[in-house]
Amino acid sequence: MSYIKSLIIKNVRAFFLLVAFGFLCSHNLYIKFDTYFLFPNDEATFSLFNGTFENSENIITRDRIIDATIVGNNEKSAIDTNLWKDKDSTVTYVEFKTGDAGTYVAGVSTKPRNIELTAEKFNDYLKHDGVVDMLKFREDNNLLAKDAVESYQKHVKAIYQVGDVKSNDWQTEFGYPIEFIPLENPYEKYTHESLEVKLLLDGKPLPNQLVYADYLKTNYFEDEHNHDHSHDNDEHEHANHEGHNHEGHNHNHDEHDHSDHDHDHDHEGHDHEGHNHDNDAHHHEGDDHNHDHSHSKGQQLRTNDQGVVKVDLPEDGIYYLRTIHMTNVTDNAQLTHESKWATLTFEVIHNIDEHGHDHNHHDHNHGEHHHAHDGHDHDHEGHDHDHHHDHEHEDGLPLWVFVLGSIAIIGVLFLVFRRKN
Amino acid sequence: MKTLSSKGVITFLFVCVPFLSFAHDVTSADQEILRNGGLWAYIRVGATHMLTGYDHLLFLAGVIFYLKGFKDILKFITVFTIGHCITLIGATYTGVTANEYLVDAVIALSVFYKGFENLGGFEKLNIKSPNLLLMVGLFGLIHGFGLSTRLQSFDIGSDQFLAKILCFNLGVEVGQILALIPIVFIITMSRKQKQFEAFYKAVNWYIVLAGVCLFIYQMYGYFNGYH
């Protein structure tokens, strides 16, 4: 009986660990499009994901946004504060007109805020958000027991492609306290290549800084992914597809071993009481030691002397880079640390020629496809790029897995009861 | 050997079942379909939601298991349908909503309840089980409220508001019928089998466990989520 009890306890724990993935996420900020390939002069949406790149957990209140700008075709346009909307209390988004064809860059910068953390929680956060340089500094200087009051600020950018015309706006320097700037147009890069990205801190290249790069795999060119191919639609619609969810990405939480982690952070532990923080603040809550899995996955890179990292682009996908630059603060009685967070997102697909080759290789033949970007036709035979693809479901288990899993469970139970009978 | 077998079963269940509710979320793809697809899209999303709403399906399977004869099934499903139509349309139209986790937790309890009742739980506790038709009607109201909170989490705008609700509801009914066809078929066929008793127990234990796990999951979400 006690064996069964311990087994149940063990499994309940495992259950909570599994469930925890849905909730326990630190709050990086990203600009996220469902697809980064948009139609010219079309309606489009991008969201501010505050959490992980997969799941946003909080909205961003307007007072926090000190800059929101889109640059394209040599024009800089500020996003009107009133245009921001919130959805489900978790996502802040804006709808806008894409404009003429070109490579665009959007940026959002948020106000600095303070957070007070106990030493233990601060150390955990450093560890699990990959701020290992500061953690090492604390270890080396016997500071691990010191509590922290950290000022943090987030500055995020996304580069997206409208139509087929490649323009140079992607290299626009926004002048944020920290920002990524690619050295080449990401939309002139293709899967299996690499992209060099420079990191600027206060306008100067930042050497020896840890940068994490990961991606959500996209499958526009793979039929295996169970897209709902609507073959009656000839157009490859990239515009404004919120539903473009990439289940097949390589960020698989299940791969991580959580067995050694005790989950002792609670939300209170990271409460921002007295600091005038609202819920879109820099949350460390829930970084319950799961975060080795979510924050040091992907490529772990370090900027060279010129502040440049080289990001591999192994698969079609939406790539996201993130870094947290943290320093000790010695000239401010209120603060112990200051951090500046930056992210950059963009999307990479196959070279069309390569893609055609791959497609033939897989012998997919779903009829003709007309891939329309800005009126430029890429005739892809053999598939439909309809981004309305309806994954059997987006946020969890596909229906067939549920059905098969249920049948398996019932089957096992059936055998047990039959034996009993 | 027996111990190992029990361990395997329990582990398997605990690993698999928690994922049930994930598929039930409103997806941004659905939102996009609704934004671009007109009223038909509401029918489609309603149907899809029902077909992938495992908690609703498990509850329905539990109800069907308990019943014998097509007439009974029709009666109970009609009551369930009326129940969920009332709250789905009423709550959505009037804008009444509640925390999704709590609503889904109650729906999970309804799943547990049905499995528990089917397994003779009330008899074992020497309690008279409540009137099933009444309970199915009550749970219909709750499931409808769950569907309503889900629908309200979409940005459906104010244009053709009632029509959209009705279309979503229609889609739910279509999805329900589509789901019921295989459920009724399998359960009816299974009754003719020698091993029906073992099958009955297996499915209802599965429903009980699923209800419990869904409930834990939703409560966990309620206390730790950000909604």
Image: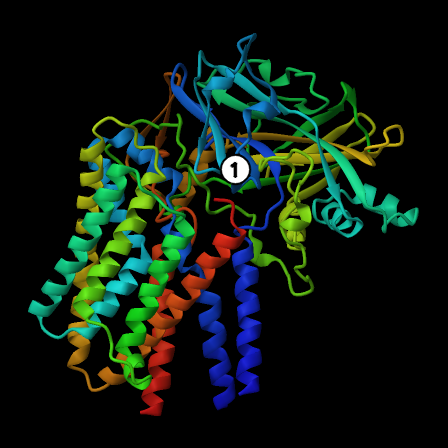
Instruction: From this view, report whether residue A308 is shown above or below residue B9.
Output: above
**Residue A147 x, y percent position in the rendering:** 81, 46
Q: Please report, as a chain letter, where disc 1 is located.
A: A
Horizontal arrangement in the rendering, residue A198 relative to residue B110 (left or right): right
Q: How is the model colour-coded? A: rainbow
**Residue A204 x, y percent position in the rendering:** 79, 20
**Foreground residue among A157 and B114:** B114
**Foreground residue among A212 and A182:** A212
**Rendering quarter of residue B128:** bottom left
**Foreground residue among B88 and B56:** B88
Horizontal arrangement in the rendering, residue B216 relative to residue A304 (left or right): left
**Residue B18 x, y percent position in the rendering:** 45, 62
Describe the element under mark 1 as helix, strand or loop. Answer: strand
Q: Can residue A5 be seen in this view?
A: yes
For label 1, the residue is A317
Residue drawn 44% across the image and 71% down it: B13
The total number of labels drawn is 1
Residue drawn 49% across the image and 54% down it: B221
